[in-house]
Amino acid sequence: DTGVSQDPRHKITKRGQNVTFRCDPISEHNRLYWYRQTLGQGPEFLTYFQNEAQLEKSRLLSDRFSAERPKGSFSTLEIQRTEQGDSAMYLCASSLQQGRTDTQYFGPGTRLTVL
Amino acid sequence: QKEVEQNSGPLSVPEGAIASLNCTYSDRGSQSFFWYRQYSGKSPELIMSIYSNGDKEDGRFTAQLNKASQYVSLLIRDSQPSDSATYLCAVIRNTGGFKTIFGAGTRLFVKA
């Protein structure tokens, strides 16, 4: 257990529905990341926050995806109008960025299945 | 060309042998490099980070970085069946925006 928690651990939804995932990072960590991972692939970067500011967003993140970290603590990732291609493991990671070190620790992930 | 490339494997080694995992990256400006282990159905767990050229040792693991060749490797000494997993190489790219890029991973099997 790294100290990063994610909720829910599993989500099954029907195509077209909206889903929201939550991530609670390690408390003193200032950076929070979202990734998506499909079978046989490495995690794919989606976005990251430094405190409450969203500093980078992948071009892969369509306008159906939105992430927030309102008070610089927990974060939510929302997917609107889900599609079957959104089925994947959604991973959250956090880090304490100091100088050039930025070691990320992952949560257990949320597995999304879109029917 | 993928930004971070790894042999997908599987790499099979006998118990007690040295497993050697390799990774190349394309962004010459990258500064931070990581190895993660991922068991099936689980999230990645950090094994090692390395930032400077040369070797870094931690127990049975040694990470090697060669920035001139854009190459990172991980050696696992005295491999155990419990080391059987997918090993992910990750690189933090600073060019064109800060972003962490993962390779697709190398599957390692350690035979008892």
Image (cartoon, grey):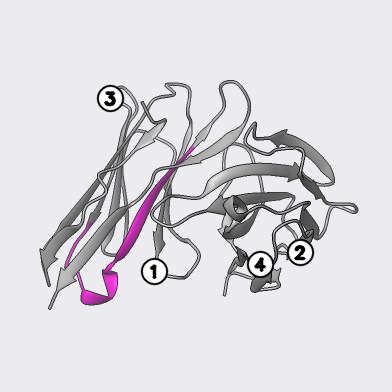
Residue A22: image tag:
2
**Distance Cα–Cα, label 4 vs label 3:** 35 Å
**Residue B68: percent from the left, percent from the top?**
31, 22
Q: Residue B105 carries which label?
A: none
Is mark 2 in CB contact (under 8 Å) with mark 1?
no
Question: Image quadrant of residue A78?
Answer: bottom right
Give the CA distance from mark 1 to mark 3.
29 Å
Amino acid bearing label 2:
Arg
Q: Residue at x 70, y 59 (%)?
A: A15
Q: Is mark 1 on a helix, strand or loop?
A: loop
Circle 1 is placed at which residue position? B39
Residue B85 on the magenta span: yes
For residue A108, above or below residue A36: below
Q: Give the range drawn in magenta.
A: B76-91
Dividing the picture into quadrants, the one containing residue A59 is top right
Q: Earlier in the sequence, mark 2 or mark 4?
A: 4
Q: What's the chain of the residue with tag 4?
A: A
Q: Residue at 60%, 55% (x, y): give it.
A: A84
Magenta span has A64?
A: no
Q: What element carries label 2?
A: strand
Q: Name the residue under label 3.
A: B69
Quadrant (top left, top right, bottom left, bottom right) of the C terminus of chain B: bottom left
Q: Is residue B43 above or below residue B103?
A: below
Q: Do the CB atoms of the residues marked 2 and 4 lie less than 8 Å apart?
A: no
Where is the N terminus of chain B found, in terms of image quarters?
Answer: top left
- The amino acid pointed to by label 4 is Val
> Distance between the Cα atoms at labels 3 and 2?
40 Å
Circle 4 sits on which residue?
A4
The crowd level at tag 1 (other Cα within 10 Å; few <14, some 14-19, many 20+) is some
- Asked if residue A92 shows in the view, the reply is yes
